Every structure is written in structure tokens, then in C-alpha cells.
């Protein structure tokens, strides 16, 4: 482990929309996009096939709109469109770093992206292209965490790598509890029983049923995506 050799052949990288904000309070930070793109380029250079699911919380969050009185389905569709905007921005950044990329969306919008077709997505990855999945599952009431678990299962990814702003999963919120303890390893059942904040229950259950491991790690530490792919002991590893 940690010898510069990829441990996985095909990964699903889950990025939150908030991760793209950098130090900003809203929107997309170009420097953060470029930093992510450099790491993804290094991962692709190792021969790893990469798919990415990206959230939209930096632009619009469906649950927040619903809580404010908006129809939940409408709010969720707006959130899905926000993920497409993020996907387009990430695609642009990746291609500026000479990474061949395809953006595929669960809501068809032919002028800006390909429609999501599983076999086509796998073919793109086999050709070394990074595939970005936008617009969630295409249906309201599902999170982008669930999208990540679903797409990873569909394309037979080896692992879901959830990049966050914290360095793993804790027994309580480390931002408000100085005695919070970080877990190195967990099972899917541990996460469900203890109600730990890894991914939502639908996503965890889907990963458990398909024996799909999850790694939660800190995106803000430069080089961590590459370290994760090479199997270095970072973050929290969740498996059956």
C-alpha cells in the first residue's frame, strides 16, 4: 500500500457541491476545480478508470428549498440541474488539464451533455475517459449519495470514494465535540445501526447489498485522491 501503484481498477468518486466552493460561501471556486483536476489526471495516469458524481449544494439544495415551502419534487429537480452546472464546470477544468471527459445526465439535455446510458458510460471508461454523472438519478426524492451508490453498482466500480471536508467518519460531529473519535474501519451495518453520517440510508443499504466498499476521506488535503486510489490508510473505510 502507498507505493504509487493503483489498488483499484475502476472507482466512483463522489464530490459534494460544497467541496467546489473552496473558501467561498457560494458558487464554484476555479482554484479548487483545478486542484481536483490535477489529482484526477494523476489517477487516470495510473491506469484507473474514473467516474464522478457531483452534488449541487453550492448552488441549490432541494431539501432546503422544500423546507422553505417549495414543492419537494420541483426543488429536487432544481437541485439536479445544479449538479449539471457543476458537472459542466468540472468537465471544463479537466479538459483544460488534458483529461478526456464525458458528461452524462439522467435528465436529457442534448446541447450540453450525453444522456446517461450504462453501456456507453462503461465504454467511455474503458477508453480512458473520465465520466461525470449529472442530474442525480433523474428522479426526485433521491440524494446524490444514492446516485453515487447506484451508478457505482451499475458500472461495477470497485469502490465509492466520498471526498468531504473532514478526514473520515466520527462518532459525533468533530466541529462541535472536541472528544469526537474517528473510525478507521466500519461495516455497512455499523453505519446503519449507529446512524453515522457517512451517506444516507438508501445509499448505504445499496452498497451493503452489493458488497460495495466506501472510503470517506478529506478532499482538502492535496494529493488525497491519489493516496486513496493507491490504498494508503487515510479516512474511514467501510465494507461489509
Image (cartoon, rainbow, N blue to C red):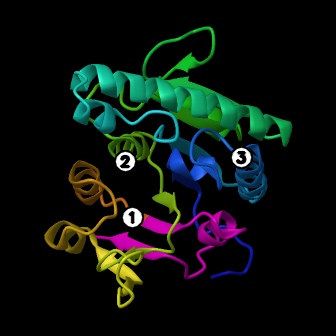
Left or right position of 132 against 97: left
As drawn, 52 above or below 65: below
Work out which quarter of the rendered image holds the C terminus and state it: bottom left
Left or right position of 25 against 3: left
Question: Residue 14 placed where, x, y %?
Answer: 50, 50
Residue of label 3: 33
Residue sitting at x 75%, y 60%: 46
Residue of label 2: 145
As drawn, 50 above or below 113: below
Looking at the rendering, the stretch of residues picked out in magenta corresponds to: 215-240
CA neighbours of label 3 inside 10 A, class few (<14), some (14 to 19), many (20+): many
Q: Is residue 123 something one can see in this rendering?
A: no
Question: Residue 229 placed where, x, y %?
Answer: 62, 66
Question: Residue 163 placed where, x, y %?
Answer: 53, 59
Residue sitting at x 50%, y 23%: 105
Q: Nearer the viewer, mark 2 or mark 3?
A: 3
Question: Magenta span has 120?
Answer: no
- Cα separation, mark 3 vs mark 1, equals 26 Å
Amino acid at each position: 500500500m502507498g507505493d504509487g501503484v493503483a489498488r483499484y481498477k475502476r472507482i466512483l468518486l463522489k464530490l459534494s457541491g460544497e467541496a467546489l466552493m473552496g473558501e467561498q460561501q457560494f458558487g464554484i471556486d476555479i482554484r479548487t476545480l483545478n486542484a481536483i483536476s490535477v489529482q484526477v489526471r494523476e489517477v487516470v495516469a495510473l491506469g484507473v478508470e474514473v467516474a464522478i458524481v457531483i452534488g449541487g449544494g453550492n448552488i441549490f439544495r432541494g431539501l432546503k428549498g422544500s423546507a422553505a415551502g417549495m414543492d419537494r419534487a420541483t426543488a429536487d429537480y432544481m437541485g439536479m440541474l445544479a449538479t449539471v452546472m457543476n458537472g459542466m464546470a468540472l468537465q471544463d477544468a479537466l479538459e483544460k488539464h488534458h483529461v478526456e471527459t464525458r458528461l452524462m445526465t439522467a435528465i436529457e439535455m442534448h446541447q450540453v451533455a450525453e444522456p446517461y446510458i450504462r453501456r456507453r458510460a462503461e465504454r467511455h471508461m474503458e477508453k480512458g475517459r473520465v465520466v461525470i454523472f449529472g442530474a442525480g438519478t433523474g428522479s426526485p426524492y433521491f440524494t446524490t449519495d444514492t446516485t453515487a451508490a447506484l451508478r457505482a453498482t451499475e458500472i461495477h466500480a470497485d469502490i465509492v470514494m466520498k471526498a468531504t471536508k473532514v478526514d473520515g467518519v466520527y462518532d459525533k460531529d468533530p466541529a462541535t465535540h472536541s472528544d469526537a473519535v474517528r473510525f478507521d474501519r466500519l461495516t455497512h451495518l455499523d453505519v446503519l445501526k449507529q446512524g453515522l453520517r457517512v451517506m444516507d440510508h438508501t445509499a448505504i443499504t445499496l452498497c451493503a447489498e452489493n458488497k460495495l466498499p466506501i472510503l470517506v476521506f478529506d478532499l482538502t488535503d492535496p494529493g488525497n485522491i491519489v493516496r486513496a486510489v493507491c490504498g494508503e490508510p487515510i479516512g474511514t473505510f467501510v465494507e461489509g
